[in-house]
Image (tube, helix red, strand yellow):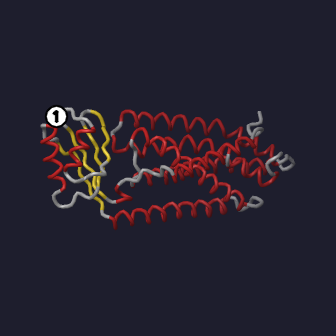
Amino acid sequence: MNLLSKRIYLFYFSIVAIVISIILLVVPGLPLGIDFTSGSTITYRWEDKNPTQDQISESMEKAGFDTSIIQSMGNKEFFIRTSDLGLNGKEKIDDQLKDLIGELPVTLDVNTVGSSVAENTIRNSIIAVFIASLFVMLYIIYAFRNVEQAYLYAIAAIITLIHDVFVVMGLFILISLFVGSVVNSIFIVGILTVIGYSVNDTIVIFDRIRENLIINKSTEFINVVNMSVRESVTRSLGTSVTTSIVILSMLLFGGQSLRDFLIVLLLGVIIGTYSSIFVASNLLLTWRYGLRK
């Protein structure tokens, strides 16, 4: 079975996915949390009353916080993201909620992040992703030093990694429109985990290609790559399915605090498996033969 027989269509599919993801990054853009934008978040729970989002929004406006984002979390719990509360903003909000709804809610959590902290978070996140990518490239060049044009394997792995990160972010934006997910510090942890998972899957297939090149020296390169992908696909799919089942279980039955991280992780596992099989190996063949063979 030739898994790469339709590789030109897979190539174009991946390009379209990246382009759509880039467009989504521009409009509507990543839903940045207070870790990146500065501001405050409050989590409330009502014991008896069951207020609506409109009631809470009206209370926030009367308290002087017009640009608040309110998200229902179920069980009479609401998550509110707004501008910096300042010294007495929280008390004003509590008073307005009590007057309009008739019950003072229980405050489960309050967080405030200043603009300087948000700027540091953005800078450190960029540095972390860059350093991770750099070490990935250096490792692959070293590990495949005995293979002809080893740098091509490193470049292919980095392009695959970039593909995964962009597509995961694009899908995360779409999901956030429905579930209210935001980009925070743990999102960056998720992206770094996706990078590690993507590279791991890619190296497994590249390593099999390296072994088969040594064993089958007279076999054409395209056949060696296809053979290597066939030999690795069961392992890759098996690992991805079992990992996805665990992540789904945590996503369905775990708490809200890890939800965004788990969403990124699940998307990363799925996209990383696809890219390691159909993008990374495809890039090696494209450099050797072009798009037409």
Residue 108: where, in percent of width, then height? 21, 45
Question: Foreground residue, 152 or 83?
Answer: 83
Q: How many marks?
A: 1
Q: Nearer the viewer, residue 192 or 18?
A: 18
Residue 125 falls in which quadrant of the image? bottom left
Tell me if 207 is positioned left or right of 75 in this view: right
* Quadrant location of the C terminus in the rendered image: top right
Residue 124 vertical position relative to residue 257 in the rendered view, above or below: below
Instruction: For the N terminus, give its image quadrant.
Output: top right
Name the residue at 15% across, 52% down.
Answer: 92
Q: Which residue is mark 1?
A: 47
Q: Residue at x 15, y 58 (%)?
A: 88
Q: Nearer the viewer, residue 260 or 179?
A: 179
Residue at 57% from the left image edge and 52% from the top image edge:
22
Question: In this view, which residue lies farthest toward the right?
Answer: 218
User: Which residue occupies the foreground of this view, 276 or 23?
Assistant: 23
Amino acid carrying mark 1 in the image: Glu
Q: Is residue 19 left or right of residue 246?
A: right
Q: Residues within 10 Å of mark 1 (few under 14, many from 20)?
A: few
Q: Position of residue 80 (x, y in %)?
A: 28, 47
Question: Residue 224's spot in the image, x, y percent?
Answer: 79, 45
Above/below status of 252 relative to 291: above
Looking at the image, residue 281 lies above or below residue 130? above
Name the spot of residue 262 as percent of width and height, x first.
Answer: 43, 43
Image quadrant in which you'd find residue 10 = top right
The part of the image, by quadrant, that contains residue 150 is: bottom right
Disc 1 secondary structure class: loop
* 45 relative to 235 in the view: left or right: left
